[in-house]
Every structure is written in structure tokens, then in C-alpha cells.
Image: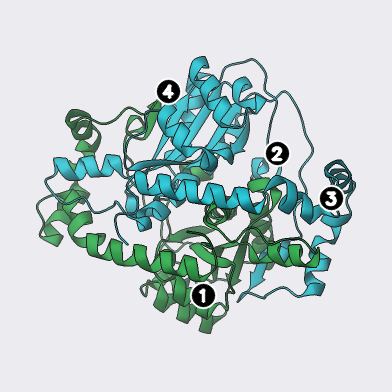
Chain colours: A green, B cyan
Amino acid sequence: MVDTIFSHRSIRKYLDKPVEEGVLNQILMAGIRASNTGNMQMYSMIVSTDLDLKEKLWEVHFKQKMVLQAPVHITFCVDVNRFHHWCKASGTSIPYDNFLWFVNGAIDAVLASQNVCIEAENNGLGICYLGTTVYNADRIIEILDIPKGVIPVTSIVIGYPDENPTLTDRLPLEAVIHREKYNDYSKMSIHEFFNEKDNSEFSRKLVLENGVKNFASVFTEKRYKKDDNIFFSKKYFEILKKQGFFNHD
Amino acid sequence: MVDTIFSHRSIRKYLDKPVEEGVLNQILMAGIRASNTGNMQMYSMIVSTDLDLKEKLWEVHFKQKMVLQAPVHITFCVDVNRFHHWCKASGTSIPYDNFLWFVNGAIDAVLASQNVCIEAENNGLGICYLGTTVYNADRIIEILDIPKGVIPVTSIVIGYPDENPTLTDRLPLEAVIHREKYNDYSKMSIHEFFNEKDNSEFSRKLVLENGVKNFASVFTEKRYKKDDNIFFSKKYFEILKKQGFFNHD
């Protein structure tokens, strides 16, 4: 059993203690050992530790304190730019500026990120993913001088933990797993699978705090609302085109 | 150091030996412990072991022998369908049928898949990712009865290895890592970073076999050609729209 997988919690408070260069190096090496499409490694990791840069990134990531606190910030990007440079240097064509390679590269980047996280946690470090990367990818592109052919998909912060939170709840395994084929949900199975979530102390507290009728509404009416989702969908898709991942109809 | 990360090789030959139910369960549990957006778990894992199903999947995955050989096949999907069922049961709106949640869900699905792979390898099993998932997602949707709101992004096969391949080469760490900001590549740095790849015995052999002028051309002219890339880009994007992940301009 890989203990770090089963004991993973996102860490949002960090000690004022840098990550040793040797440890950081090993963590990054773990990233590049991940599977990737055709061994073409269509991703890049941008490792930022500079305080000024972190302050700019903190603004973009909705001013979450941990972005300032954690000593290391890594932005994982789809990257066809490096491969295209190689194609040019080899006098051949430039065929990866399209949606397929955004998807392939995103898979590769995320496989690398998870290796980095597991290896980091195995070294006593804490991590937290930043979903805000997709929301403000345009500003991250500016801050980190990211060229065409490259687009951020996710980011993490890494550092020594200054908190020890409990494990987060998950849906029962049967809710997420389908045996053989996809078994669509019935009203009854949804009720069964979400029952614990709906009735936990945690969710009741959030429902009260947010003044909504139930836990699902905390997500749909407060945290991830339709208008925001559509706004950020359009925005990220525009960035994707601008970065050169959609040179076709 | 998480040994399985550093000793990972894709396994393409499998013993005729099933994966024990207890082991499989533990591996799947590892998947759901992964970080995910807002703890909303917008993904599903479809675990197929049935021979007839595997034969259909084998056809779709370009008839790669390992798909028939390996006892377990897992299809990782973005899934907003389950969450939407919950929204409906809770009498609230249905806001996740858009591109943002395709991207969020794809990240979540791939984080789960990498946990599954690392835990599998830690149990003595071998794995291989199937990039062909994106190419023929429409046929996978048919075979596995996948409803609207769900789209396959990657698949793996799992089983006991019947081969012991060497580690695959990777670009030097400095080629994939950028310190502080993105450092774009020069002709010189590209030459330096790809030198080993260009001149390895492995690549020279492939160049000869494929009758092309250099290693980059093996990718651009043979394996991942522009026309194919554009064909599959358009196809996957259409599937994405059809599955309900693009209900906006």
C-alpha cells in the first residue's frame, strides 16, 4: 500500500521553511518518470519560488493565502512549443497545434503533477492543487512569460505542512466505479450514494452558512454557478485558441 | 522515495492470471483518494473484465494485443452526469454542462488514474495507458453504454507482467523544467536537449525502419501526422459537444 496515497489531504497552511534543492530535484524527477503520449513529453513544469512572482500568482489564484505561504509553486502546462522547436530544427513539419494535442498534453501534464505530489508527500511535504489555474490562465501566461504552444492546466503549491487536517470524505466506491459497462444512476441510487454527504455535520453547517436549501445548492448557487462556469468556459477556450491549440474548424 | 514511481515502465505483455478482487478494490480506493475539484468527484471509472467487452475494446484501441491479454481494463471518464442527477434530486439547477467542467473533470479523472496505476504497480501489477481512448471515444461510448454528461479521456490495462522492459529514456530534467518563468528554447538549447534522443541507437533504428531523414520525422511523418491529428481533433471535439460539454458559444 502506498501510504501517501491513502493519507493524502490538501495542505493549506505552510511553515516558513524552504524545500531543500535536493528534495525538490527528486520530486521533479518523479514527475518526468510518468507515462506520457508517445514519449513526446508534451508538457512543461514552471517552478516559481521568487517572492514577487508568488505575489502576482497569489492575486491570480483568488488571493488564497497558501500561495504566498508555500515556498514552491509549480505551474503544469501543456507544451507543444518545445517539440515544435525540435521539428523546426529537424526541418520537418509542425503538426501539433490542435485540440487533440491539447488533450494529450493535458493528460501528460496531470500524470506528471500527480507523480510530483505523491513523491513530495512521501518526503514529508504537503501539497495543494489550484483549480484557479484554468480560470485565470491568461494572467498566468503573462506573469510567467508563457509563449504560444503552451497553456497552463493546473498548479500546485508545495511546502512543509503547518496543519494536520483529517481526511476528506469521498462518495462510496460503488458510486464512482461501474462494473463492465456504465450503470446509469436511478433516483434511488443517487439518494443512497449522496445520503452521507447530504446529512453530514459538515454539509449541514455549510447549508446554514450559505442560506440555501440543501448541500447540492451550495455548489450550484454559491460555489460554482452556471453564469461563472459559462464565463470561464468561454474564456479558457479563447485562451486555448490564442495559444495555438485550435488551428482547425 | 516512492520506488514504483521511479521504476515505472509500461507493460505490454501480461500473464494469464486474474487480478484478485481484494487487490483490485484497494487499487480503485487509491483512485478515489486523489485530489479533485471542490470534492465534487466529476469522474467515473468503468472497470471491464468481460471477454466479449474486452474484444470490442481491443478493436477500438487499434487492436493492441495487451488489451485482450490484460485481465482488467479501466476507462476513466469525465462525469458530470452523476452530479447532475444529484442536482435534479435536490431540486436545484444543472450548471456543469460546459467546457470548464470538461477540463476540471479531465484533470480529476487523470489524477485518479495515476493513483490507481501507482497503487497497482506497488502490488506487483503492470499497467499501460491507452492514448487511443481519445481517438475512438465515440465507439467506447457505444460499447460501454456511456450516457450524456460523460466522456472517456483515458484508459489503462492492468495485469501481472509477462515482461520486464528497461526504463524508457526521458529528456533531461532541465528541458522540461523552467525556473521562475518560462525560458523559451533557442536553437542551441533544443540541440542540447534532444541530442541524446536524436543519436540513440533506438532512434537510429526507427529512422532506418521508417525510411525518414531523422527522429523528429518519425513522429511528424509516420506516427502522429498532421492530417490524422486534425481529423481526431475535430472528431473528439464533436463528441465533446454531443456529450453535452459545450452548451455555449
Locate residue A22, reporting x and y percent. Answer: 70, 63
Q: Label 2 neighbourhood size at 10 Å, few (<14), some (14-19), many (20+)?
A: many
Dot label at residue A180: 4
The residue wearing badge 2 is B9
The residue wearing badge 1 is A141
Say if residue A157 shows up in the picture: no
The residue sitting at the bottom extreme is A52
At mark 2, the secondary structure is loop
At mark 1, the secondary structure is helix
Locate residue A243, reporting x and y percent. Answer: 53, 69
Q: Label 4 neighbourhood size at 10 Å, few (<14), some (14-19), many (20+)?
A: many
Q: CA distance from mark 3 to mark 1?
A: 36 Å
Instruction: Answer yes or no: are tags 3 and 1 on the same subunit.
Output: no
Q: Foreground mark, 3 or 1?
A: 3
* Front position in the image: A59 or B210: B210
Q: Foreground mark, 2 or 3?
A: 3
At mark 3, the secondary structure is loop
Q: CA distance from mark 2 to mark 1?
A: 33 Å
Q: Foreground mark, 3 or 4?
A: 3
